[in-house]
Image (cartoon, rainbow, N blue to C red):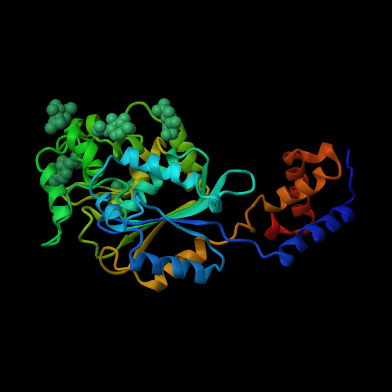
């Protein structure tokens, strides 16, 4: 049974597609999580926000922080329990009314620098009520690190953290307190599999990557639900060892052989939803020039243009608009699948692909 003829449906479309012209669609809010040794109110990070707003005017930028005081926020990049840090960030986001959509949920884009990238991914996987469209990470350590970074001569916070780790990485004291230790990852030399110490004690990365026997299905569902997960690796990165961790690859430390993500069990058995995401073209591997976090503004602007901004051309946008219009007219038409069917037929008939 058809309630509408094609011309009346087309009139509906003319009506709904006229809506955005009167009120320009608002860009999704953007979460930014900075890296180790940085702080949320640093000038460089603010420049990033300024670029985001220049590319998509009206973007609300939320700088993720563990403390309102910048210096304490920096200390929290070295010291703390990452599980608790992510819980705190999730709670903080829920307090910010500017992140809330009309339906009471949070729909955002997310940008992570270095360790902020894998923590942001942890947030995507664990924060109930948070829905992320594009997750973009630069120089992150999605597959952990095999070595700790070298600290600057006078960076005593960094040196303190590194000194604690030495030889004690798998103790609970270190795993609950020293941030980089929580994404340290070691392999068993003879099997090439994650070491027992790592699997037993890693407080963050082993869990968030679903490497243990029991997998968390929510994690996989959340990753598969992303529209894009874009991973940039810096071409000349000598800080992250191995740098291919930024692409979720595995590296044999002895031979230097790199096993790309698609050849790893985490992908083939889809422990984390990465394969599912890849199958809908949502997994993107990118290279940025230069050394770790020596970011060119043009590279950032390109990424923002491509992956952030308003969500109007989203696949189901028109279907939802039609649905909500119809719900005010004919209550029985509220079922979105009915409209999806109609939309498909229309697409076939009219070749209006770009709307659907
Ligand atoms: C999976 O992760 C979610 C989000 O952190 C959590 O609520 C849930 O308890 C976890 N499930 C299992 C089986 O660990
Ligand atoms: C980190 O915090 C979580 C949540 O409070 C806790 O369950 C976990 O045991 C802590 N990790 C360590 C290594 O103590
Ligand atoms: C490496 O794996 C082998 C085989 O499972 C095991 O016997 C050995 O104890 C492991 N070595 C380490 C350091 O975990
Ligand atoms: C890593 O590379 C070394 C040197 O080529 C090799 O002997 C070793 O078997 C490799 N380890 C794994 C787990 O493949
Ligand atoms: C990855 O897997 C493909 C297909 O199975 C294979 O052709 C390729 O050589 C593998 N690459 C590496 C680096 O292991």
Which of the 4 image quadrants contains residue 329?
Answer: top right
Residue 174 spot, x, y in % from top left: 18, 38
Whether residue 291 can be seen here: yes
Whether residue 254 can be seen here: no
Ligand 1, by image quadrant, is top left
Q: Is residue 342 above or below residue 14?
A: above
Residue found 90% across the figure and 50% down from its top = 5
Q: Is residue 73 above or below residue 309?
A: above
Residue found 59% across the figure and 60% down from its top = 310
Residue found 27% across the figure and 57% down from its top = 71
**Image position of 93 (left or right of 4):** left
Which of the 4 image quadrants contains residue 24?
Answer: bottom right
Direction top: furthest residue: 214
Residue 195 spot, x, y in % from top left: 19, 34
**Image position of 315 (left or right of 326):** left
* Quadrant placement of the N terminus: top right
Which of the 4 image quadrants contains residue 125?
Answer: top left
């Amino acid at each position: 049974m058809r309630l509408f003829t094609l011309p009346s449906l087309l009139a509906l479309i003319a009506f709904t597609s006229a809506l955005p012209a009167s009120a320009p669609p608002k860009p999704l809010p953007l979460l930014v999580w900075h890296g180790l040794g940085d702080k949320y109110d640093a000038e460089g990070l603010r420049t990033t926000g300024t670029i985001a707003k220049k590319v998509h005017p009206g973007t609300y930028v939320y700088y993720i922080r563990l403390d309102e005081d910048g210096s304490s926020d920096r200390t929290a990049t070295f010291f703390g329990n990452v599980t608790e840090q992510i819980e705190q960030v999730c709670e903080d986001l829920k307090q910010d009314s500017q992140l809330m959509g009309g339906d009471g949920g949070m729909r955002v884009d997310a940008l992570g620098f270095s360790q902020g990238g894998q923590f942001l991914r942890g947030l995507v996987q664990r924060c109930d009520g948070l829905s992320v469209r594009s997750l973009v990470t630069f120089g992150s350590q999605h597959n952990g690190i095999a070595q700790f970074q070298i600290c600057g001569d006078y960076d005593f916070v960094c040196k303190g953290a590194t000194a604690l780790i030495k030889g004690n990485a798998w103790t609970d004291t270190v795993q609950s307190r020293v941030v980089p230790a929580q994404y340290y990852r070691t392999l068993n030399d003879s099997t090439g599999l994650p070491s027992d110490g790592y699997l037993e004690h890693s407080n963050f990365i082993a869990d968030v990557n679903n490497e243990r026997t029991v997998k968390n299905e929510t994690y996989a569902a959340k990753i598969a639900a992303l529209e894009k997960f874009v991973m940039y690796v810096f071409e000349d990165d000598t800080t992250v060892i191995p740098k291919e961790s930024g692409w979720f690859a595995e590296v044999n430390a002895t031979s230097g052989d790199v096993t790309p993500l698609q050849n790893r069990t985490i992908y083939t058995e889809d422990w984390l939803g990465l394969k599912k995401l890849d199958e809908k073209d949502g997994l993107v591997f990118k290279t940025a020039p230069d050394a770790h976090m020596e970011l060119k503004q043009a590279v950032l602007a390109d990424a923002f243009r491509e992956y952030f901004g308003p969500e109007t051309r989203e696949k189901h946008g028109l279907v939802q608009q039609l649905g909500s219009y119809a719900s005010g007219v004919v209550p029985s038409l509220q079922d979105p699948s009915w409209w999806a069917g109609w939309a498909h037929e229309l697409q076939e008939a009219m070749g209006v692909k770009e709307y659907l």
